Amino acid sequence: MSRLLRGLVILILLGSCAPRDRSAPTSLDNACNILEQRPHFVRAFRASERKWGVPAHVQMATLYQESKFIGDARTPFRYALGVIPMGRQSSAYGYAQALDGTWNEYKSETRSGRARRDKIRDAADFMGWYMAKTGERNGVALSDARNQYLAYHEGHTGFARGSYNQKAWLLRIAGEVDARANMYRSQLDTCRKWR
């Protein structure tokens, strides 16, 4: 076997061992189980928490709502007349469901040109960056999961205008994100993987 072929086989084998996260972890209501199943999440959330100050439980609750922890999550297709595909609802993609424009702004500002939305470390860093900006622009505490989620969903300008007040469904979901963040915080306090 030639060196090139041997090297290619090794590269393929190593690539197949890398975490793909194409499906959601089981037990999404248990932060400890999520971290047990995806140990690389621990490093990602800790790094973002250290760098941007956004608590891990706020990141996790938002990621749950946005993608259910699925790395290649996309918005559904739109259909005309119920059958003709018209493209996706938006350009949101990955763990954090970041839009193309916002993702590009993040990469430019943080000089993270190689960042990918389907990598948890990059998605957690993006979320920390965005939420830190929400704190600066809109005065929302980094630990305020409800209002951080509203600003995440509506954008900084939409949040400042209060556009969410006309969306009862979004206010309900923001309340659910807040409750999940509180649940995850309590669980992380007892989680062996997190300590």
Image (cartoon, helix red, strand yellow):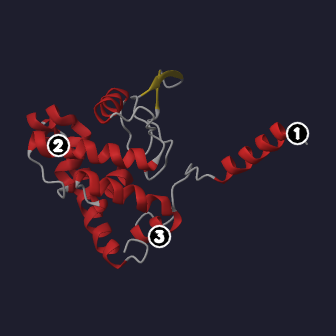
**Amino acid at circle 3:** Asn
Image quarter hosting the N terminus: top right
Identified at 69% across, 50% down, the residue is: 14
| Residue type, numbered disc 1 | Ser
Which comes before the other along the chain, label 1 or label 2? 1
Mark 1 and mark 2: Cα distance apart in space = 55 Å
Mark linked to residue 2: 1
Q: Nearer the viewer, mark 1 or mark 2?
A: 1
Q: Quick one: label 2, few (<14), some, or many (20+) residues within 10 Å?
A: many
Can residue 98 be seen here? The reply is yes
* Disc 2 secondary structure class: helix
Whole-percent x and y of residue 9?
Answer: 79, 44
CB-based contact (under 8 Å), mark 1 and mark 2: no
Q: Find numbered disc 3 in the image and state the secondary structure of the residue it sits on.
A: helix
Q: Which residue is mark 3?
A: 33
Residue 36 spot, x, y in % from top left: 50, 69
Question: To which residue does mark 2 refer?
Answer: 134
Q: Which of label 3 and label 2 is nearer to you?
A: 2
Q: Is residue 99 left or right of residue 54?
A: right
**Residue 30 in view of the camera:** no
Residue found at x 31% / y 76%: 189
Q: Nearer the viewer, residue 67 or 55?
A: 55
Q: Earlier in the sequence, mark 1 or mark 3?
A: 1
Q: Give the crowd class for mark 1: few <14, some 14-19, many >=20 residues within 10 Å.
A: few
